[in-house]
Image: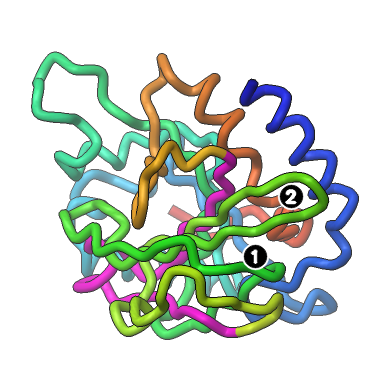
C-alpha cells in the first residue's frame, strides 16, 4: 500500500513543483548551497569535532563561509556515523541495530533563519524532543494536493515556534518557524531537518528522521526525497575547503 501512495505522491510533487515556495530565503541567481557530507568518508569531520557542539558548529560555519555559500545542504538517504554521538539512535539494548540512515534534507545556516511554508497546510502537531541528538523543537504540517494527503516535518526549530495549534491554517509562503539554537534544537549546529512523510503512523510531534538499515526500504518509501519540494540540490556545490 505505501509503495502505491509513495509513487502517487512523487508524481504529484513533480507536477506541482513550480508552485512550491522556498523553505528559506535565497536568490537562485547568485546563491549556492554547499553539499555537506556527514558520513565517514568526510575525513575532516573527526569524532572530536562532532562530539563537541561548539567545535561542530564552528566546523559547519567554516565550511559554509570558506565555500562562499549562504547555506549548506544534504543528508537524504545518507548513512551517518555521527549518530553514534547520541543514545537516541542506538536504543536501550547494546546489541540492537543502531539507526544511521538519514531520512530528511538538512539545511545548515544561522540560528534565527526564517522558515517558510512550501505549500498550503494545516498544523498537524508540535513536539519538544529534547534529548541530546534528537529534533528538539519540532513542527509537523499536513498538506493535501489532489487526492493525496501528506506531511512535512521541521526539526531543530525554535521553542518560540511551538505556539502553533493543531488545525491552524498556514498559507504557502508564510513564515512559521526559525532555525533553533543548540540548547533548543537537540544540541546540533543550527539547521533545519526537513522531511516528507506519507503515513504518520498515529504519531504526533515526532517521527523517525533516522532509520535502521534493515528498515530503510519502508522508510525511504514512506519518506520520499524532500528535494521534490525543496528543489535545492540543483544549486549545490562541493566543498572547496582544504584539510
Image: magenta residue range = 175-198
Per the rendering, the mark at residue 33 is 1
Instruction: Look at 20% across and 41% down and name the residue there.
Output: 88
Q: Mark 2 falls on what kind of element?
A: helix
Left or right of residue 110, residue 198 in this image: right
- Count of numbered badges drawn on the protein: 2
Give the residue at mark 2. 228
Measured from the top left, where is residue 96 in percent x and y? Answer: 19, 17
Report the mark closest to the observer, 1 or 2: 2
Judge from the rendering whether residue 68 lies leftward or rightward of residue 146; answer left or right: left
Q: Which mark is residue 137?
A: none
Which residue is at a point 63% across and 68% down the rendered structure image? 121
Q: Is residue 33 above or below residue 150?
A: below
**Rendered image quadrant of residue 205:** bottom left
In this picture, is 214 found above or below 9? Answer: above
Packing grade of label 2 (10 A; few <14, some 14-19, many >=20) is: some
Q: Indicate the quadrant containing the N terminus: top left, top right, bottom left or bottom right.
A: top right
Residue 86 counted in the magenta span: no
The reply to whether residue 236 is in sight is: no
- SS type, badge 1: strand
At 53% across and 38% down in the image, what residue appears?
199
| The quadrant where residue 43 appears | top left
**Residue 39 appears left or right of 48:** right
- The x and y percentages for residue 222 are 57, 33
Q: Earlier in the sequence, mark 1 or mark 2?
A: 1
Q: Nearer the viewer, residue 234 or 230?
A: 230
- Residue 100, image x and y in percent? 36, 32
Among the 4 quarters of the image, the one containing residue 30: bottom right
* 233, 145: nearer the viewer: 145
Residue 233 appears left or right of 39 = right
Disc 1 and disc 2 in contact, CB within 8 angstroms = no
| Distance from Cα at disc 1 to Cα at disc 2 | 16 Å
Amino acid at each position: 500500500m505505501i509503495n502505491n501512495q509513495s509513487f502517487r505522491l512523487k508524481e504529484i510533487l513533480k507536477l506541482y513543483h513550480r508552485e512550491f515556495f522556498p523553505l528559506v530565503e535565497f536568490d537562485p541567481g547568485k546563491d549556492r548551497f554547499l553539499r555537506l557530507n556527514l558520513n565517514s568518508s568526510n575525513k575532516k569531520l573527526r569524532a572530536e569535532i562532532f562530539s563537541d557542539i561548539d567545535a561542530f558548529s564552528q566546523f559547519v560555519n567554516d565550511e559554509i563561509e570558506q565555500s562562499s555559500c549562504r547555506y549548506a545542504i544534504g543528508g537524504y538517504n545518507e548513512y551517518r556515523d555521527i549518530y553514534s554521538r547520541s543514545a537516541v539512535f542506538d536504543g536501550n539494548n547494546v546489541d540492537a541495530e543502531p539507526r544511521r540512515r538519514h531520512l530528511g534534507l538538512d539545511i545548515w545556516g544561522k540560528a534565527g533563519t526564517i522558515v517558510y511554508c512550501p505549500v498550503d497546510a494545516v498544523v498537524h502537531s508540535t513536539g519538544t524532543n529534547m534529548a541530546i541528538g534528537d529534533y528538539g523543537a519540532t513542527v509537523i504540517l499536513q498538506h493535501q494536493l489532489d487526492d493525496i494527503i501528506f506531511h512535512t516535518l521541521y526539526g531543530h526549530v525554535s521553542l518560540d515556534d511551538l505556539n502553533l495549534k493543531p488545525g491552524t491554517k498556514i498559507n504557502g509562503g508564510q513564515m512559521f518557524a526559525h532555525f533553533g539554537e543548540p540548547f533548543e534544537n537537540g544540541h546540533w549546529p543550527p539547521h533545519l531537518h526537513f522531511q516528507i512523510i506519507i503515513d504518520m503512523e498515529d504519531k504526533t510531534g515526532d517521527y523517525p528522521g533516522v532509520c535502521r538499515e534493515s528498515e530503510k526500504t519502508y522508510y525511504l518509501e514512506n519518506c520520499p526525497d524532500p528535494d521534490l519540494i525543496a528543489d535545492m540540490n540543483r544549486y549545490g556545490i562541493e566543498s572547496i575547503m582544504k584539510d
